Image: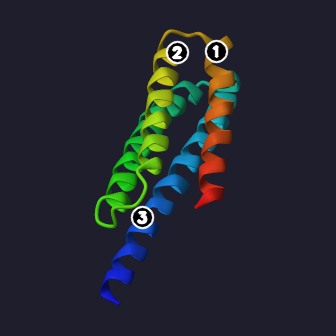
Amino acid sequence: MAIQATAQRRFSFLQIAITLQTLTIFLQAVSAGLLLTSSYGETLHSVGARVMYGAAMLYVLAAVLAWKPGGGSPRPIWHASGFLVLASVQVVLGIAHIPAVHLPLGVLMFGLSVLALARR
């Protein structure tokens, strides 16, 4: 019974991490719109990028913690790690001011995050 409760708690932590990641990516889209229309949009988008990156790292941590004790499939770790790579590329593209790739990648990341959330 205690093992099941522990597994459920870790599963919940994974769900929370994916939900947080999805929410932060959505908020990045909102702040990107503000970036184009207001003076404080750049600050919000910059801070949001750091939070989104942290959420991607939290997703990796949650995937590892959910996998390790139960010895299940490491597939969620690969998904989370791949997402962290995409987030890294996204940050580099944003800093380099390459919106032709930065914006579509952001849309792709949001779609993939929603897909990961729906699978949990």
Q: Position of residue 114 (x, y in %)?
A: 65, 49
Q: Earlier in the sequence, mark 2 or mark 3?
A: 3
**Residue beneath disc 2:** 93
Determine the CA span between mark 1 and mark 2.
Answer: 7 Å
- From this viewpoint, is residue 34 visible? no
- Which is in the foreground here, disc 2 or disc 3? 3
State whether residue 109 is above or below residue 99.
below
What residue type is disc 2 on? Answer: Leu
**Residue beneath disc 3:** 13
- Label 1 secondary element: helix
Q: Position of residue 89 (x, y in %)?
A: 48, 21
Q: Residue at x 60, y 55 (%)?
A: 117
Q: Earlier in the sequence, mark 1 or mark 3?
A: 3
What residue type is disc 3 on? Answer: Phe
- From this viewpoint, is residue 93 visible? yes
Of residue 63 and residue 46, the one placed in the foreground of this image is 63
What residue type is disc 1 on? Answer: Val
**Residue beneath disc 1:** 101
- Label 3 secondary element: helix
Report the quarter where the C terminus lies.
Answer: bottom right
Determine the CA span between mark 1 and mark 3.
Answer: 32 Å
Q: Position of residue 4 (x, y in %)?
A: 38, 82
State whether residue 108 is above or below residue 62.
above
